[in-house]
Amino acid sequence: MAGTPVNPSPDPARVLPTASGDGCAEFPLFPLGTVLFPDGVLPLRIFETRYLDMVRRCMAQDSPFGVCLITRGGEVGTPAEHHSIGCSARIVDFDMDAGGVLQLRTVGHERFEVLHRTLRKDGLLVGTIRTLAPDPIMAIPPALSVCVELMEAIVQDLRKKLGDAFVNVLAEPLRMQDCGWVANRLSELLPLSAAVRQELMSLTDPIDRLSQIAAMLSPEGSDPPGAGDPLND
């Protein structure tokens, strides 16, 4: 949503999120250089005052905030431009490191579309959002079984390498026969660019999403875009 007008808000203490009569809601936005998927685990290190205040409010109200992929700008400082499709995040665990930086473990909840955003006096972006329909629970077609086999191999490898820290990468329950869940996890774990992940997350059909991933894995298809460790991209 690069180019979307940002209106200043005079009230930095407004309770969030709030629902409106037209089915929309408002909550704080956290533009990042990564893509969050529903049920995906996203660790965060929080040190800017605007986001520390946001986290306090979210924890006190047990409310989510929205994660959107940055299109222009950075994660720190001046509020960045970002894609209009994002995913809400809920805080499930937190800790403070020795340097006083707040560390969060968040999990993706629902996809949303940002209809409008406002810049508050404290520098926090607040979005008026429309929640998108969740993926329907769908069995994985036999033609896409290679994706299940790959996901099972990744899970086995992660459990072996990480032990108890496995939950910092994948949130249970593991729905290995659910098309949308497998598509989302492979989108996170394969070495894909953020732009490709955004495109996959924005798809409304989980079979289409998984089919595109299978095409990337096929010897006849193109190699997965991006490079590097799939857990650290």
Image (cartoon, rainbow, N blue to C red):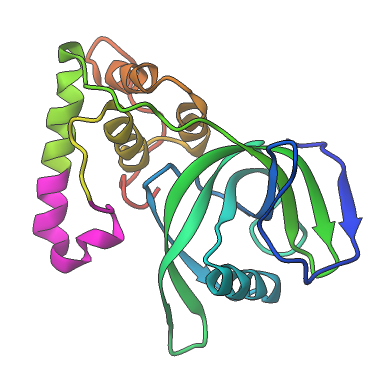
Q: Nearer the viewer, residue 78 or 8?
A: 8
- Where's the N terminus, which quadrant? top right
**Where is residue 112, by image quadrant?**
top right
Q: Is residue 97 above or below residue 89?
A: below
Q: Is residue 65 above or below residue 72?
A: below
- Indicate left or right for 71 with 111 as reference: right
Q: Position of residue 154 (x, y in %)?
A: 17, 42
Q: Nearer the viewer, residue 16 or 67?
A: 16
Is 169 inside the magenta-drawn segment? Answer: yes
Q: Residue furthest front?
A: 21
**Where is residue 95, by image quadrant?**
bottom left
- Indicate left or right for 42 with 144 as reference: right
Residue at screen point 50% across, 54% down:
89
Q: Nearer the viewer, residue 112 or 209?
A: 112
Q: Position of residue 220 (x, y in %)?
A: 25, 9
Is 160 inside the magenta-drawn segment? Answer: yes
Q: Is residue 42 visible?
A: yes
Residue at screen point 20% across, 26% down:
147
Magenta segment's dominant SS is helix
Q: Is residue 197 above or below residue 35?
A: above
Q: Position of residue 223 (x, y in %)?
A: 32, 23
Q: Is residue 80 visible?
A: no
Residue at screen point 59% across, 76% down:
56
Read off the magenta span: 155-172
Q: Residue furthest bottom?
A: 98
- Indicate left or right for 214 with 212 as reference: left
Residue at screen point 16% across, 53% down:
158
Q: How many marks?
A: 0
